[in-house]
Every structure is written in structure tokens, then in C-alpha cells.
Amino acid sequence: MTGRPLIDLDGRHIAVVGAAGELGAAMTTLLLELGAHVIAIDRDAAALHAMTGSPRLRTIVVDVADEASVARAFATLETPLGGLVNGAGIENAATPLDALDTALFRRVMDVNVTGVFLGMKHGIPRMRTPGGSIVNIASTGGIKGAAGMSAYVASKHAVIGLTRCAAIDYGPAGLRVNALCPGPLDGRMIDAIMGSKPGEPSERARARMAVIPSRRFGRMAEVAQAAAYLLSDASTYVNGACHMVDGGISAI
């Protein structure tokens, strides 16, 4: 034993798409703590500006649903990427399918699916092979249905499909592609879906927690740790997987 941590990202260049969101910010913070150089990518320029401070952090403003914007961002990267996280995502308010606005459905698919596709399309040529790792943020909604969440659930099923195909396509080159599937996480998105206020779970949220085997929602930091594992050499034989971080929801 060398005494080095199992998850060691020291010196590795990792792009985090969707870095200004709560989960993306948690990942960015942890990856920097683990010694990585992080390229934080998001459309929220103000939030990215607020993240600056580390000499190993670079920020790029990008619309993940716009191919020209994504292509320009990745074209500026000079050092091969050791890791890429495709984590930009939005949700729809709980609405029966026949009442869901078609424009909203398309917007969810544009961000959640096209954004992941474009991140891989333009990120893969910049990846280090062999040894690179891509983590696409899916959800338990990628393997299960959820009442009123047709747009979000359809998008996350698609993310898992893209992940599995890319794992097959690029595995022979030594590039790993996995999906990370969180369950409900404490934060803005679950509050919006459940009608909760920050720190004040709604009755619907409490009922949801009651059926989770761990009896709570997850924390952003817990998902960030799982992402760091998939990005690291601790997971070199993990490819094409759906890695669950859901408190046991998928076991039900």
C-alpha cells in the first residue's frame, strides 16, 4: 500500500457541464479538493463568475442545447481531458402527459438529452485515450416511471441509452462511459417538483421520503463522491453502467 487515496484525481483535467447548478457546483468543489483541474461549463455566467478563485478552475459560458456553442467551448481546450461530466439538466413540473406543454417537453429534451449528446460528440475528441472517463448524469427516472414526470423521465431514459451506446463504441479505445443515477436530492429541483420550500418539506415530500429505504433525500455531496469514483482509476473496469445513488429506491 502506498498510502495514496483510492480516489486520486491529482493533475487530471475534467470538464463539468452544468457546473453552476447545485449538483454541478458540489462536483466542481470536490474535484478541486481531489487535485483536479476543472473546466466549469454552464450558461449562467454570473454563477460561474462567483465560482472563480482556484488557479485550477476555468469557466466557460455555454448553451448546452446549441451545438455551435458547445463546439466552440471544447475547441478551446488544449490539454486532453481525463474526465467529462455531462450534468446540465432541467425538469418539468408534475403534470399529466396530456396536459404537458409541448414546448416544455421539447425544452427538457433539448437540455437533458441533446445537451448530453453534444457534450459527448464534441468532448470525446478532446478526451485522453486510453484512461478517460465520461459520467452522464441520469436519474432513477432513467430506469423507472414517475407520475406526471413524462418529459423528465423520457429524457433520463434517453441519457442511459446514449451512455450504453457510447460505452460500446469507445470502450475498445480505453474510454469509459457511465451513467450516474441519483434519487431525489435535497435542493431546488426536488423542492420544485414536490412543492416544498427550502428546509420545509411538503407533505408530498415527507410521503416520498417515507418510502425510500434510507428514509431521506440524498445530499449533493454524496452524488459528487460517486462521480469522483467513476472519474478515477478506482473504477477502471466500470463501463456502460448505471451507478445508483438513491438510498435504495431502485431496490423497491
Image (cartoon, grey):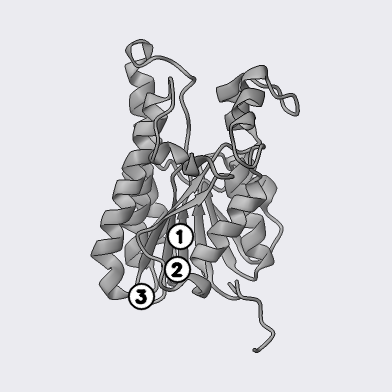
Task: Look at the numbered discs 2 and 3 and tell me whether their residues touch, using CB distance below 8 Å.
Answer: no
Q: Which mark is residue 81?
A: 2
Residue density around tag 1, few if under 14, some if 14–19, many if 20 or more, within 10 Å: many
Number of labels in the image equals 3
Q: Residue furthest bottom?
A: 1
Q: Earlier in the sequence, mark 1 or mark 3?
A: 1
Residue linked to disc 3: 129
Q: In this orientation, does residue 65 appear?
A: no
Q: Secondary structure at mark 3?
A: loop
Q: In this orientation, does residue 199 appear?
A: yes
Q: Earlier in the sequence, mark 2 or mark 3?
A: 2
Specify the amino acid type for callout 2.
Leu
Q: Position of residue 2 (x, y in %)?
A: 66, 89
Relative to 209, is 25 above or below?
below
Quadrant of the rendering where the N terminus is positioned: bottom right
Residue density around tag 2, few if under 14, some if 14–19, many if 20 or more, within 10 Å: many
Q: Is residue 90 left or right of residue 24?
A: left
Residue linked to disc 1: 84
Relative to 33, is 234 above or below?
below
Residue density around tag 3, few if under 14, some if 14–19, many if 20 or more, within 10 Å: some
Relative to 218, is 90 above or below?
above
Q: Position of residue 108 (x, y in %)?
A: 39, 30
Q: Nearer the viewer, residue 213 or 127?
A: 213
Label 2 and label 1: CA atoms lie apart by: 7 Å
Task: Look at the numbered discs 2 and 1 and tell me whether their residues touch, using CB distance below 8 Å.
Answer: yes
Tag nearer the camera, 2 or 3: 3
Specify the amino acid type for callout 1.
Leu
Q: Position of residue 52 (x, y in %)?
A: 67, 54
Residue at image location 63% in from the left, 26% down from the top: 191
Label 2 and label 3: CA atoms lie apart by: 9 Å
Specify the amino acid type for callout 3.
Thr
Q: Secondary structure at mark 2?
A: loop
